[in-house]
Image (tube, coloured by chain):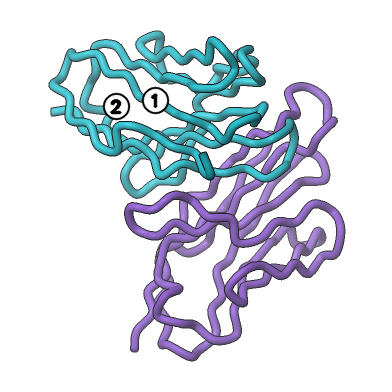
Chain colours: A cyan, B purple
Amino acid sequence: GAGVSQSPRYKVAKRGQDVALRCDPISGHVSLFWYQQALGQGPEFLTYFQNEAQLDKSGLPSDRFFAERPEGSVSTLKIQRTQQEDSAVYLCASSPRTGNNGYTFGSGTRLTVV
Amino acid sequence: AQSVTQLDSHVSVSEGTPVLLRCNYSSSYSPSLFWYVQHPNKGLQLLLKYTSAATLVKGINGFEAEFKKSETSFHLTKPSAHMSDAAEYFCVVSDAPNAGGTSYGKLTFGQGTILTVHP
């Protein structure tokens, strides 16, 4: 597609429920990032993929968070046993190469944990 | 390590007057710097970027920013605000390519500045 597509746009989860958030990057983009944006804050780095390899997961806040990109295209961010503090907008971005080249952000998934 | 400080959480201007959004950065090496805009319920859009070429960078919609190494600043300006400029703006720093370590272009965002434009 022409842009980075994220689904669902909105997700309401009950505390303790597992959720899966999907990111479809621009076709052929090597780099894929996930960011978490809490209300009133700037986005914060979660994890980075170069093709199918997860090269950096230092930003994942706990072991309840897990991300994958098995075929080097679509990526899924999974959150197990959701907590209220997980409520945020989750942003995905892709880039054609590594380095500071042409990031395109998706519109995000707004997760609300009740 | 790298960080960004946006000096104002809110800026309010009248339509047709100049806009100034302030940003200071900290980086261990020559940084790449960006300004992004986020309209409500929309994705982040790149306004402009500095990657060690000209220190005055022109972006979309009449915005520009000047990289000042001595002041570690990268302030965003626009001569005349338009109602459609009302949004949240983020100053962003990236580790430079080939800087050593994990230099794949990880972005560090500031806290954001909400710009309000009054008629």
Residue B30 lies left or right of residue B108; in this view the side is right
Which residue in the structure is indicated by mark 2? A86
Across and down, in percent, residue A93 comes to 54, 36
Q: Nearer the viewer, mark 2 or mark 1?
A: 1
Could you tell me which residue is drawn at 80 percent across and 35 percent down?
B97
Locate residue B68, reporting x and y percent: 78, 64
Which image quadrant for residue B96? top right
**Mark earlier in primary sequence (2, 1):** 1
Q: Nearer the viewer, residue A11 or B105?
A: A11
Q: Nearer the viewer, residue A83 or B46?
A: B46
Are tags 2 and 1 found on a single chain? Answer: yes
On screen, residue A26 above or below A17 = below
Q: Is the residue A67 above or below the residue B39 in the image?
A: above
Q: Which mark is residue A22?
A: 1
Q: Amino acid under label 1?
A: Arg
> Who's the residue at 27% across and 18% down the image?
A19
Label 1 neighbour load within 10 Å: few <14, some 14-19, many 20+: many
The percent position of residue B10, horizontal first and vertical second, equals 40, 67
Element under label 1? strand
In this rendering, position of residue A90 left or right of residue A13:
right
Chain ID at mark 2: A
In the displayed structure image, the side of residue A82 where residue A38 appears, left or right: right
As measured in the structure, the alpha-carbon distance from the residue carrying label 2 to the one carrying label 1 is: 16 Å
